[in-house]
Image (tube, helix red, strand yellow):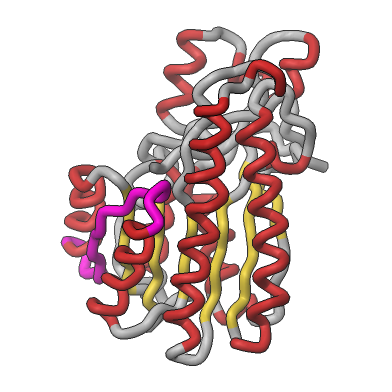
Amino acid sequence: MFIHEVCPLAGGGAQGGAWYYLSLAPDRGADNSVGMTKNSLLTGKVVFITGASRGIGAAAARLFAREGAAVVLAARGTDALDRVVTEIRAEGGAADAVTVDLADRASVRTAVDRVEQLHGRLDGAFNNGAVPQRGFGPVETTTDEDIDEQYAVNFRGHWTAMTAEAALMRRSGGGAIVNTSSIGSRRANPVLPAYGAMKRALNSLTETAAVNWAADGIRVNGITPGGTSTEMIDTWEAATPGVVKQMTAKIPLGRMAEPHEIAEVAAWLLSDRASMVTGAIVPVDGGAGA
């Protein structure tokens, strides 16, 4: 499941303050070539990425490979994953794919085990997979099914992945984990309360794990993307004219991010250049959360 990140919903009243975004489409502004750059951030590292078939996750896969990492990509659907893997390999990068269902704890652990089978270690993990809240509405109308799914995927799925990743990292002396949260975790989310609540819980888990695992040499950080430009936004704009204008008006930099710009922050946090950064929840929103 690969659904991210956030924008304000159209409409007035309390709903105008809700934030929600689907990052499902290819990155349209990035250099998608994979050849390793000079002074690569992630040279020699093995990095596991969930939600890697589309949007931010696919942009991260390409970027991390270009920065020298051997990447293991995970998502529910294999067809899109295989296309990204093929592209990375064609450009000389190292990439493999594994199926994962974040709602299934055994599936998550099996995916991390596959990383060990392939590479014998894990240096970095970008936990980027998620699922949207299916129904809009305030707290009292949010269904039990929505709450259960949000918990299973957007919170417990990350918890399971993080503990499995950390166990593997300990065996090779440490590593770094980055979790994709949301700008919607930083404020009230009256239209998507379950989504916002689980993302906020993920922030807490990220900070706590950073403290718990610091002595093991494992750094844990989060990012909170804001509005991010994909084809899904184009579709949303066609269905609800004015969404892009409303969203962009709330971003001081005056534009939405491209998926590769979100991935750049994750790459830095996973790299040794961020060696003193742990327990941070880093906004990547063009100032929208300021």
Using the image, determine if residue 248 lies above or below residue 74: above
Report the side of 176 relative to 93 (left or right).
right
Say which residue appears at 31% left-offset and 72% top-offset: 113
Quarter location, residue 60: bottom left
Report the front residue among 220 and 211: 211
Say which residue appears at 41% left-offset and 42% top-offset: 2
Q: Residue furthest right?
A: 290
Query: Percent from the top left, x then y, of residue 233?
Result: 49, 24
**How many numbered marks are there?**
0
Report the side of 52 relative to 255 (left or right).
left
Image quadrant where one finds the N terminus = top left
Residue 142 covered by magenta stretch: no
**Does residue 120 show up?**
yes
Image quadrant where one finds the C terminus = top right
Q: Residue furthest front?
A: 144
Using the image, determine if residue 203 lies above or below residue 15: below
Report the side of 122 relative to 220 (left or right).
left
Residue bounds of the magenta highlight: 90-105
Say which residue appears at 57% left-offset and 22% top-offset: 143
Report the front residue among 116 and 157: 157
Using the image, determine if residue 266 lies above or below residue 102: below
Query: Percent from the top left, x then y, of residue 79?
Result: 18, 44
Quarter location, residue 99: bottom left
**Does residue 58 show up?**
no
Query: Percent from the top left, x then y, of residue 205?
Result: 66, 60
Quarter location, residue 137: top right
Query: Percent from the top left, x then y, of residue 55?
Result: 41, 42
Using the image, determine if residue 207 lies above or below residue 212: above
